[in-house]
Image (cartoon, rainbow, N blue to C red):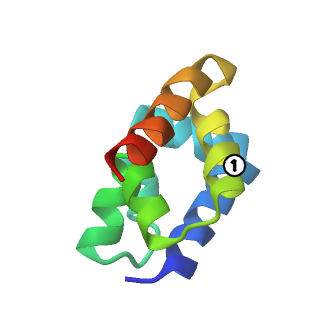
């Protein structure tokens, strides 16, 4: 598994309104354009913030991508996921 690959996908999703819209509608459709391992695909298709933090993925990039996909109204859920990580450690 490569942090670089995950971060590259996140960058593309937050950098393109078209790609973030495709992700919202069908994550697998956009993710099939990348050479992902099964674990990377699982993490990205579920936008598994907890797993990305554990791997050391850049948290600002995760946050920007989360907003691109979910909009500002998704920020409370993102923060809750981060709080769950901190509370479980």
- Label 1: how many residues lie within 10 Å, few (<14), some (14-19) or many (20+)? many
Give coordinates of residue 15: x percent, y percent.
Answer: 75, 52
Q: Going by the image, does 18 lie left or right of 87?
A: right
Q: How many marks?
A: 1
Where does the image place residue 37, in percent across and percent down from the top left? 30, 78
Seen from the viewer's position, the closer of residues 18 and 7 is 7
Q: Nearer the viewer, residue 6 or 32?
A: 6
Residue occupying the point 45% across, 46% down: 86
- In depth, the one of 9 and 85 nearer the eye is 85
Q: Measuring 45% from the left and 83% from the top, which residue is drawn there?
A: 2
Name above or below for residue 39 compared with residue 16: below
Residue 84 as seen in the image, left or right of residue 5: left
Instruction: Answer above or below: position of 4 versus 34.
Output: below
Q: Residue furthest left?
A: 38
Residue identified by numbered label 1? 14
Q: Report whether residue 28 is seen.
A: no
Q: Where, by quadrant of the figure, is residue 69 drawn?
A: top right
Element under label 1?
Answer: helix
Instruction: Please determine whether, in this image, residue 38 is positioned above or below residue 20.
Output: below
Q: Residue furthest right?
A: 15
Q: Nearer the viewer, residue 3 or 84?
A: 84
Q: Position of residue 29 (x, y in %)?
A: 39, 51
In the rendered view, does 88 fall on the left or right side of 83? left
């Amino acid at each position: 598994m490569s942090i670089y690959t995950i971060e590259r996908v996140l960058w593309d999703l937050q950098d393109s309104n078209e790609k973030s819209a495709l992700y919202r509608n069908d994550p697998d459709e956009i993710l099939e354009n990348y050479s992902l391992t099964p674990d990377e695909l699982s993490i990205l298709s579920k936008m598994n913030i907890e797993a990305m933090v554990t791997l050391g993925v850049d948290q600002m990039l995760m946050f920007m991508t989360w907003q691109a996909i979910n909009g500002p109204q998704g920020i409370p859920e993102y923060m809750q996921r981060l709080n769950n990580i901190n509370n479980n450690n």
